[in-house]
Amino acid sequence: MKKAFYLFALFIAALNLRPIITSVASMMGVIQSELGISALTASLLTTLPVLCMGLFAPVATTLSQRFGLERTLCIALLLITVATIMRGINESVTILLDTALAGGIGISFAGPLLSSFIKKYFPTSPGVVSIYSVSMTIGAALASGLTIPIYAQSENNLPLAVSCWAVLGIVALIIWIALIRQKQHSGNKTRRLRLPLGNKKAIQFTLFFGFMASMFYALTAWISPIALSFGYSSQYAAMLLTVFTLIQVPIALLVPGIVNRTGNPKLLLVLCSVSELIGLVLLLLSAPMLPAVLFLGIGAGGLFPLALMLPIMETRTAEEAGTWSAMSQMGGYILGAFGPLFIGWMFDLTGQFNASIIAMLVIVMLMIGVQFSMNLGKKVEEGSYQ
């Protein structure tokens, strides 16, 4: 019964890690027209939270060692929920940017600590990361697919459409407060660990996470605008973003199980990257966009749970998994933050997306190079980062 409760706590927490980003990503065109902002400024709505997810990830392990894993995760969920609620105050680019910042800090705490949570409560089952990644993907899909209909049904009420996702956070807080009350008498001291800055494998994980995140957030922010620039309707463009997100759900559910059975994450890493490569080539060839989006979604859906699994599989304790995850997410999200920003800047510069698609092709090829260089399967010695 306890394991089921922990799984549900993991699921509901992860469900809250993307709506604050994808709700505005799906409304990018509306936000630009209603608030009169450039593509570069609009990009900041996805860039800021991702940048925060990188910059503040190391703080997560410090807070966890001070206040405890479960309490720190609850603080993270509180930040995300309050930021989402604040978006209902008024229709303002300042509010959207401020809440993107606050929400990003909350996500930066939760991201690495949920990996630590899995290592702590499911030490022999790294495949549980599929619950984490699938839930996150479902949250992203719900927000990207339903925000526009909510906006339309509420008579074009933008603050309501982007703030209603706080409901998920309120439910999560109820569950996590119950979990904290259950764990309050079992506090155990943990030794302080540093980020594995000198470890070659940890650096490879960080580079991979950065390339993966650059692609994911660039595609999340700009799939719909790319479709519009190709002449598709706004409804079809929004549908493509939903397809990109939804196709990731079954892939994210299957990939960790396959890795558990085969013990060969490297093959799946490369196959998922090749899938993204095919999708980008199809975009460059001006092929119908749906097949391209399917290939891109399959690649993204597999790469994200693999990026989460690697620190869990290659470390020995929950604390080490947390520090390795914090490092990979710190560097990875900082790199990833510039994906949507760079594409928005290039579009403002050239007026079309072909140059940006070529840049994404280069990113994927660099990612494949990093994947081939990884020596996986040998756990780090406990406490050793050299």
Image: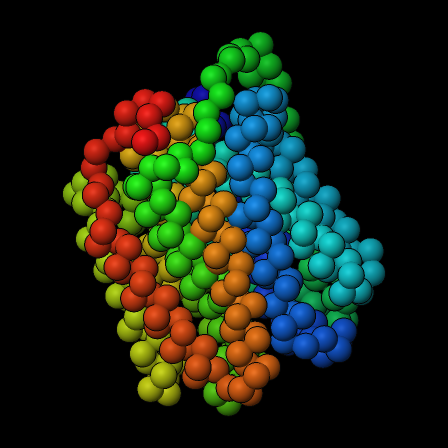
Residue under the point 59% across and 28% down? 63
Spot occupied by residue 351 in the image (x, y as percentages of width and height): 55, 87
- Where 87 falls versus 365 (above or below)? above
In the image as oriented, which residue stretches furthest toward the left?
A: 262
Percent x, y for residue 232? 50, 86
Regarding residue 23, the answer to whether it shows in the image is no
At which x and y percent is residue 5? 48, 27
Residue 166: x %, y % from top left: 68, 48
Say how many tags the image has: 0
Residue at x 29%, y 66% (from the top left corner): 365
Q: Residue furthest top?
A: 185
Residue at 68% across, 77% down: 38
Q: Residue furthest bottom?
A: 231
Q: Quadrant of the C terminus?
A: top left
Q: In front here: 235 or 275?
A: 275
Compared across the picture, whether 117 is left or right of 31 comes to left
Q: Taking 239 as reference, is 379 left or right?
A: left
The answer to whether residue 201 is above or below residue 243 is above
**Of the pair 86 and 173, the residue shown nearer to us:** 86
Give the residue displayed 67% in from the left and 52% down from the top: 101
Quarter of the figure that contains the N terminus: top left
| Quarter of the rendering containing residue 276 | bottom left
Residue 333 visible here: yes
Q: Is residue 2 left or right of residue 302?
A: right
